[in-house]
Amino acid sequence: MQIVDFRITRFQFARDRLIGDSQISSNEVQAASLELVGNDGTVGLGFVNSVMSGLPDEAEIARVFALEAWPELEGQIPAVLVHRQLKRRGGNRRKMSLPFEDAIQQAVWDIYAKSMRLPLWKLLGGAKEKVRVYASGLDFHLSDHDFCQIFARAVKDGHTAFKIKVGHPDVERDIHRLDLLKSTVGPESIVMVDANEAWTPKQTLRALDLFRKAGHAIFWVEDPIPRDDVAGLRLLRGGSGTTHLNTGEYLDVTGKRSLIDAGAADIINVGGQITDVMRLGWYAAEKNVELALGNSFLEVGVNLAIALPEVNWLEYSYQNVDHLVNKTFDIRDGYIFPSNEAGHGLTLSEEARKHWRQPSPVGAESSEADVRVGLAKVGAR
């Protein structure tokens, strides 16, 4: 099979809540699907996701893709592409103008797995049947009422582990949120916190100490300090007691490898970049370092979580994008299960393309109106 065509579909709609952390916030989805088409009609699907900067109109996305990405994909055999190593030097070593990298990896691996008639997790060597999942509220900017609502929903959905956003200038507010979480999900639940680089090393140690004194056992603290403070991360890893240090979300493969080499993390946070994560997974296995699958669009990263024995957790964040695909991954009893269909398990919904496609950017008010109309037409999880 050869890749002979591509399709870009742009989506934009309001979120069901304001999501964010100590540094950013977002109240709408701007994303695009990338479909790579084989000469036998097989389609590989990936997603371009832009949380903060938004996306230009659909024609411009397609133009940039055709210019920067398509020459390396057209006429290629997917099985060859997924294993190809390229020299990247000088001006050739740069990111694309739009965030296509994840989408390309997802779409190429999807079409490759379909050509082999295998689920992607099985093609990647996976032997597990499921992986533990934690509910992440992306809750920093929510009111106390809405904070409790999202985690009460997670409990109802069967989650037993929960991650909240911390890093408020007043640490007492973080403690207050942990108190609310405990009253909502129960004292026996597993709790993680994510500061999104809001603290210094000493502020982190102080916060963790105050959390413990307030009666909160923290399973891991995620990205507490800036990503390039390797000395500080090593200090925290040695001084955080039974709380694990999870970091690396904002770094590329080289940066994550550097953290492993420096002994600067208990757990390395990875996402949905399939080729990159597999390479890092093999390296982490050699070094006996655990990985955690952070947010990946529509949890496509479950394939990686199943394939890599070093991954024990996957993040689910209630980002209300499930209606973009025909079927999502099954989550129950605190676990997420991969699809047994060929490919990565996600297929674009034609109903979603019909009702949620937005070729040109619209203002926030129009986006909110569209979401009210669209939800009446298309079922969301």
Image (spheres, rainbow, N blue to C red):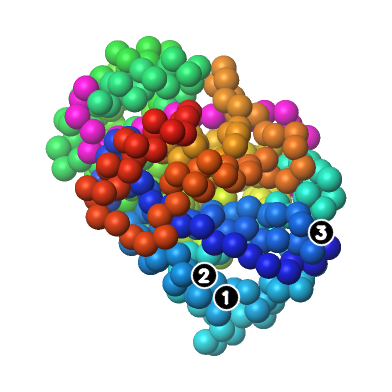
Q: Amino acid at mark 3?
A: Asp
The answer to whether the residue labelled 1 contacts the one labelled 2, judged by CB atoms less than 8 Å apart, is: yes
Residue under the point 28% across and 31% down: 209
Residue denoted by label 1: 66
The answer to whether the residue labelled 1 contacts the one labelled 3, judged by CB atoms less than 8 Å apart, is: no
- Horizontally, residue 172 falls left or right of residue 57, namely left
Residue denoted by label 2: 62
Q: Do we see residue 103 in this rendering?
A: no
Q: Nearer the viewer, mark 1 or mark 3?
A: 3
Q: Amino acid at mark 1?
A: Ala
Along the viewing direction, whichever of 365 and 70 lies nearer the viewer: 365
- Place residue 215 in its image quadrant: top left
Q: Residues within 10 Å of mark 1 (few under 14, many from 20)?
A: some
Along the viewing direction, whichever of 248 and 236 lies nearer the viewer: 248
Q: Amino acid at mark 2?
A: Ala
Extent of the magenta region: 124-145
State yes or no: residue 1 in magenta.
Answer: no
State yes or no: residue 138 in magenta.
Answer: yes
Residue under the point 54% across and 29% down: 133
Q: Percent position (x, y) of residue 333? A: 57, 17
Along the viewing direction, whichever of 274 and 58 lies nearer the viewer: 58
**Disc 3, SS:** loop
The disc, 1 or 3, on the residue closer to the chain's N-terminal end is: 3
Q: Residues within 10 Å of mark 3 (few under 14, many from 20)?
A: few
Q: Percent position (x, y) of residue 115? A: 82, 53
The disc, 3 or 2, on the residue closer to the chain's N-terminal end is: 3
**Disc 1, SS:** helix
